[in-house]
Image: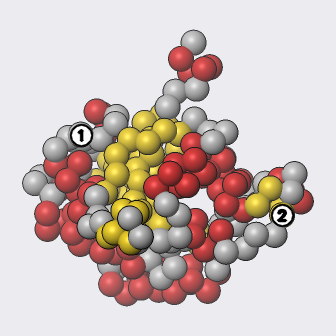
């Protein structure tokens, strides 16, 4: 995931041309846990970006678990004492009254297994007309995206077509790019054990008009 993002930043090929290069680029890690993905992203950007000194990066992580958020904050405070560009918040992604989703917008959103975890619970959500969490996920996440923001999802549970259908149905998200992994063949069917697809938010009818 990280290599994919850095490649597009270096090539200035993100959907919104104004994002690369840009004075400030914001990342959101959905289901951040202890913040490892953001910390690694920060390190790799400093090492691999062609002109890191020209950009300011802001890293934000959200997680359902308050303990995970406390852990991530402790790591950030210990490891990056002088870096104030890390923030972590406890957020219930499947709450219809979660104000964070309405108030925050990010350039690049990352999901490494969170949608998979949500899909494990197939109980209907009364607050969302008895839809399952995995069917509500994209409608909630898109609230934190601007036009041309990127949502990069890595899944081990869904096929490419299943993931595309799940994310694009009833949202203004569309497939932008994907990470290619080695394929395997079994029973005459080709596939991959991991799927990573990048979606981008298109302009709504109101924005277009």
Location of the N terminus (image quadrant): bottom left
* Residue at horizontal 33 percent and vertical 84 percent from the top: 79
Disc on res. 124: 2
Identify residue for label 1: 13
Cα distance in 3D space between marks 1 and 2: 39 Å
In the picture, the disc for residue 55 is none
What residue is drawn where x is 50% and y is 51%?
A: 161
Q: Is residue 59 visible?
A: no
What's the residue at 57%, 43% (across, down)?
168
Residue at image position (55%, 55%) is 162
* Quadrant of residue 66 within the rendered picture: bottom right
Residue 189's quadrant in the figure? bottom left
Tag 1–tag 2 contact (CB < 8 Å):
no
Position of residue 55 relative to residue 146, above or below, is: below
Foreground disc of the pair 1, 2:
2
Q: Secondary structure at mark 2?
A: strand
Q: Is residue 119 visible?
A: yes
Relative side of 13 to 208, left or right:
left
Left or right: where 35 falls relative to 162? left
Badge 2, how many Cα within 10 Å: few under 14, some, many 20+?
few
The quadrant of the rendering that contains the C terminus is: top right
Is residue 94 found left or right of 81 in the rendered image? right
């Amino acid at each position: 995931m990280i290599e994919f993002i850095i490649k597009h930043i270096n090539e200035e090929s993100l959907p919104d041309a104004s994002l690369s290069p840009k004075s400030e680029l914001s990342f959101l890690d959905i289901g951040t846990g202890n913040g490892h993905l953001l910390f690694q992203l920060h390190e790799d950007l400093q090492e691999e970006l062609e002109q890191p000194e020209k950009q300011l990066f802001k890293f934000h992580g959200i997680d359902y678990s308050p303990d995970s958020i406390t852990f991530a904050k402790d790591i950030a405070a210990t490891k990056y004492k002088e870096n104030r560009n890390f923030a972590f918040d406890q957020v219930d992604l499947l709450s219809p009254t979660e104000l964070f989703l309405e108030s925050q917008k990010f350039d690049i959103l990352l999901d490494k297994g969170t949608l998979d975890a949500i899909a494990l619970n197939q109980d209907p959500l009364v607050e969302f007309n008895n839809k399952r969490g995995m069917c509500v996920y994209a409608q909630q996440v898109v609230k934190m995206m601007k036009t041309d923001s990127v949502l990069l999802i890595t899944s081990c549970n869904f096929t490419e077509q299943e993931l595309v259908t799940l994310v694009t149905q009833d949202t203004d998200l569309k497939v932008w790019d994907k990470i290619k992994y080695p394929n395997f063949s079994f029973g005459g069917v080709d596939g991959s054990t991991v799927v990573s697809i990048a979606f981008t938010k298109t302009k709504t009818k109101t924005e277009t008009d």
